[in-house]
């Protein structure tokens, strides 16, 4: 039997001068009813590692960080964003680099989404907080009681 070659789908255009071509992937819109969902999912495997999904912005060869692309998540119309939510298992979520929170931050050990939580720690922008370097620190100090 001949082995099949798999082709990777690739979209985009390269130009020598000017801007590169934009690509928009959009789910269906509806005049009546709900809009269509858009799923980006890596491939599954019965005997190996499942496929990754990578979302990355374009780099700039100028080596100037002000020219690097930015990944925007839900900048215009989303009511909320959930990362790592799973009813089946706890999803480990790692964040590398500096993190800026615009607004209040609520942390809870509850793994079920809710609009309010009975056990939580809230850090507001008006509080003077001192945090240990690791996000997974067992104690948060410097908060008002």
Image (spheres, helix red, strand yellow):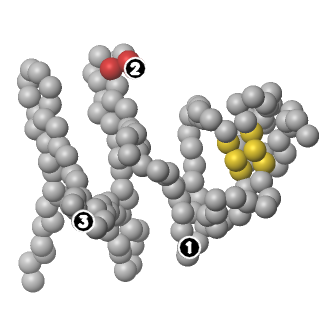
121 relative to 7 in the view: left or right: right
In the figure, is residue 37 to the left or right of 49? Answer: left
Q: How far across and down, in percent of the image, does residue 40 sit?
A: 32, 60
Q: 10 Å neighbourhood of mark 3: few (<14), some, or many (≥20)?
A: few
Q: Position of residue 106 (x, y in %)?
A: 70, 47
Query: Foreground residue, 81 or 60?
Result: 81
Residue 139 vertical placement versus 89 (above, below): above
Closer to the camera, 79 or 27?
79
Give SS at disc 1. Answer: loop
Q: Residues within 10 Å of mark 1 (few under 14, many from 20)?
A: few
Q: Which residue is mark 3?
A: 32
- From the image, tell me which residue sits under label 1: 87
Front position among marks 2 and 1:
1
**Picture quadrant of residue 135:** top right
Relative side of 25 to 101, left or right: left
Q: Quadrant of the C terminus?
A: top right
Looking at marks 3 and 2 on the same chain, the residue that comes earlier in the sequence is marked by 3
Proximity of marks 3 and 1: CB atoms separated by less than 8 Å: no
Report x, y in % for residue 66.
Answer: 38, 18
Nearest the camera: 133 or 113?
113
Residue 126 image offset from top left, x and y in percent? 75, 28
Question: What residue is at 8 percent from the left and 24 percent from the top?
Answer: 16
């Amino acid at each position: 039997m001949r082995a099949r070659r798999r082709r990777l789908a690739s979209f985009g255009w390269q130009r020598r001068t000017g801007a590169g071509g934009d690509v928009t992937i959009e789910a269906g819109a509806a005049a009546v009813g709900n809009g269509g969902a858009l799923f980006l999912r890596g491939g599954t495997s019965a005997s190996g590692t499942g496929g990754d999904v990578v979302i990355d912005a374009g780099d700039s060869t100028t080596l100037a960080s002000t020219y690097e692309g930015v990944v925007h998540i839900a900048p215009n119309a989303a009511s909320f964003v959930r990362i790592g939510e799973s009813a089946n298992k706890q999803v480990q979520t790692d964040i590398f680099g500096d993190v800026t929170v615009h607004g209040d931050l609520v942390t809870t050990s509850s793994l079920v989404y809710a609009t309010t939580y009975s056990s939580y720690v809230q850090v507001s922008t008006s509080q003077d907080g001192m945090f240990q370097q690791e996000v997974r620190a067992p104690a948060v100090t410097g908060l008002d009681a």
